[in-house]
Image: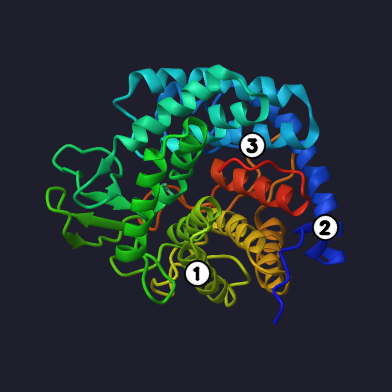
Amino acid sequence: MKVQPPQSIPSQVHEEDQIWLTSIWSNLQTKMSAECARIGSRIPYIPVDGHYEDLGEKDIYWWTNGFWPGMLWQMYRATGEMDYRLTAEKVEERLDAALSGFTGLHHDVGFMWLHTAVANYRLTGNPRSKTRGLHAASLLAGRYNPAGQFLRAWNDDPGQNRAGWMIIDCLMNVPLLYWASEETQDPRYRDLAILHTDTVLQTTLRRDGSSNHITIFDPADGSLLDHPGGQGFESGSSWSRGQAWALYGMALGHRHTHNPDYLDAAKRIAHYFIANVSSTGDLPLVDFRAPAEPVVYDTTAAMCAACGLLEIAEAVPAYEQRIYISAAVRMLRATEQQFVNWNPEQDGIVGGGTEAYHGGKQEVPIIYGDYFFIEAVLRLLNRGTHLW
Ligand code: GLY
């Protein structure tokens, strides 16, 4: 069969879905314009009684602190409105306290600076932002463990040494290293990104298309020790946001390397994810392998997975694209119908986000659910910008 090159995503979207997207885009502009004016450079996470507190005051190191500026840069790219850009730039400056403070930073420097400084540099060429991005990339590279060939997750807790810990989420931080190599023409960052991704393939992804959350190695000799349950139900279960990090992370690995093994892995996880949401109305439960009760959803997993599915769609021939695009649209539409709050006077867009199976907040709006919703909608409209 003659391979048909990928087609643009919007051209593959059903007419009825196009109409839906046009109305969503109009709602998003109203909501985001109101939020931008109200929230400004405060750093949102989870709204309390419909309003965000400033997480920057409470924890400038928190891993989600880049998602609000990421939303603002996406909106700036899509609308050209300067308020979005100026607000994103102010948050980027606030995060300098975290860069210089250092001690609270961990593997999530990618989430924090890809969506702030690197986004700014990519869209405006700001040299100060480039320096911030390279600084963050060097911190991430410094977390590499040569014995186990992985980027270390988190920092120690009192009583718990985590020198040998790797988590699936970190795949989403790795694109910071690919960017740094492109900018500096120094292959070292990229080499570490590839070594880490290969370790994930060999030790953390399972053959059935699911993924562990945490992998623990002996930090001195690199031997594999354990897979605790992490934010999922238990060891061996299948935390849905972890599956989404794996899906999108592997697809991004393919984008940056063209390694077909990474695309195959992303597709296996995608097929597993699509199969799992097919019996729950295209909405993921917080863990795909947990007891039937309680029923708790996590829309953030759906939103991140939707972006990953669209990333795969950009990498496969035209005749393969539909399965990924239509699954992404089904998850977006199901989430919008059941969980989205379009009231411009209240903060938060996508409800139904869950921090973890055990503990944490459940079925609430979480800022990264909003980010991935906007990214997915703008990808489908071909108006977004690539931040990974
Ligand atoms: N990366 C942390 C989480 O997904 O909750």
Q: Which amino acid does label 3 sit on?
A: Met
Task: Report the residue marked by disc 3.
Answer: 71
User: Camera-side residue: 166 or 345?
Assistant: 166
Q: Can residue 54 be seen in this view?
A: yes
User: Camera-side residue: 320 or 304?
Assistant: 320
What percent of the width, then of the height, locates residue 221?
12, 53
Q: What element carries label 1?
A: helix
Task: Report the residue marked by disc 2.
Answer: 20
Task: Report the residue marked by disc 1.
Answer: 264
Rendered residue at 75%/59% (across/down): 9
Whichever of labels 1 and 3 marks the residue nearer the N terminus, that label is 3
Q: Residues within 10 Å of mark 2 (few under 14, many from 20)?
A: few
Q: Which amino acid does label 2 sit on?
A: Trp
Q: Which of marks 1 and 3 is in front?
A: 1
Rendered residue at 54%/48% (across/down): 364
Q: In which quarter of the image is the C terminus?
A: top right
Rendered residue at 22%/52% (across/down): 148
